[in-house]
């Protein structure tokens, strides 16, 4: 029990005195999380919007796969990224294994399906509401997508925060 109380005392001391090692660890964690969220948003928002508005053969299975990917276990993603970035892997020559960019890659793979699936649902709901109006204005697919992304921006901000 003494070891646990000493650990808590040390932790409180480090937080209270803004220990440089602790600040570096927290800073790295925030940088990795924010970078991976930004990368995921750049990929996931357009992907989700395209799935919401676009109609193409195989759309249903793509949506099912995207929803299923939301449940990817982090350990599996970490293992796949490890195998890809290890020396024997196809990207081993890049030397990224055990680096912050590798953490960003792994987190981005985990976050993209979440952002894309939630974006698809949000934009699809808006599309059902505004479809006739956008079609009457003769808006192109890209114009419709950008309009709906702008119109649902606050809901999509909530998606990014989730």
Image (spheres, grey):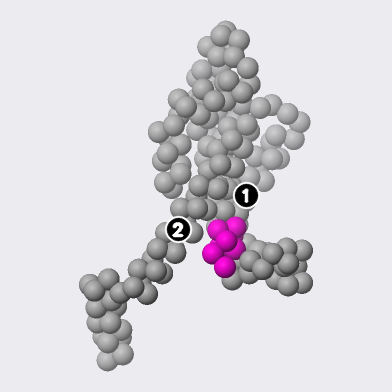
Disc 1: which residue: 68
Residue that badge 2 annotates? 31
Instruction: Looking at the image, tell me whether mark 1 or mark 2 is earlier in sequence order.
Output: 2
- Residue at (35% x, 68% y) in the render: 23
- Disc 1 or disc 2, which is closer to the eye? 2
Q: Quadrant of residue 152?
A: top left
- Quadrant of the rendered image containing residue 76: bottom right
Judging depth in this view, the residue of 84 and 56 nearest the camera is 84
In which quadrant is the N terminus drawn? bottom left
Marks 1,2: beta carbons within 8 A: no
Q: Position of residue 62 (x, y in %)?
A: 69, 40
Q: Position of residue 90 (x, y in %)?
A: 77, 63
Left or right of residue 92, residue 51 in this image: left
Helix, strand or loop for the magenta stretch, by majority: helix
- Residue 105, quarter of the rendered image: bottom right
Query: Which region of the structure is painted magenta?
Result: 99-106
Q: Is residue 18 left or right of residue 62?
A: left
45 or 87: which is nearer to us?
87
Q: Residue at x 56, y 17 (%)?
A: 131
Estimate how packed mark 2 is, as few (under 14), some (14 to 19) or many (20 or more) residues with alpha carbons within 10 Å: some
Relative image position of residue 10 (x, y in whole percent): 28, 82
Residue 72 in sight? yes
The residue sitting at the bottom extreme is 2
Q: Residue at x 30, y 74 (%)?
A: 19
Query: Is 151 inside the magenta-drawn segment?
Result: no
What crowding class fits label 1: few (fewer than 14 Cα within 10 Å), some (14-19), or many (20 or more)? few
Mark 1 lies on a secondary structure that is: helix
| Horizontal arrangement in the rendering, residue 87 relative to residue 115 (left or right) | right
């Amino acid at each position: 029990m003494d070891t646990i109380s000493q650990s808590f005392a040390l932790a409180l001391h480090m937080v209270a005195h803004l220990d440089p090692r602790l600040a570096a660890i927290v800073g790295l964690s925030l940088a990795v999380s924010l970078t991976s969220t930004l990368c995921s948003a750049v990929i996931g928002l357009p992907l989700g919007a395209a799935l919401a508005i676009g109609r193409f053969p195989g759309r249903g299975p793509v949506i099912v796969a995207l929803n299923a990917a939301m449940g990817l276990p982090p350990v599996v993603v970490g293992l796949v990224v490890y195998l890809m970035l290890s020396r024997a892997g196809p990207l081993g020559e890049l030397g990224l294994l055990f680096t912050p960019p590798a953490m960003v890659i792994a987190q981005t793979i985990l976050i993209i399906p979440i952002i894309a699936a939630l974006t698809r649902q949000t934009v699809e709901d808006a599309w059902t509401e505004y479809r006739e109006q956008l079609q009457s204005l003769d808006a192109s697919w890209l114009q419709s997508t950008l309009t709906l992304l702008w119109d649902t921006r606050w809901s999509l901000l909530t998606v990014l925060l989730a």
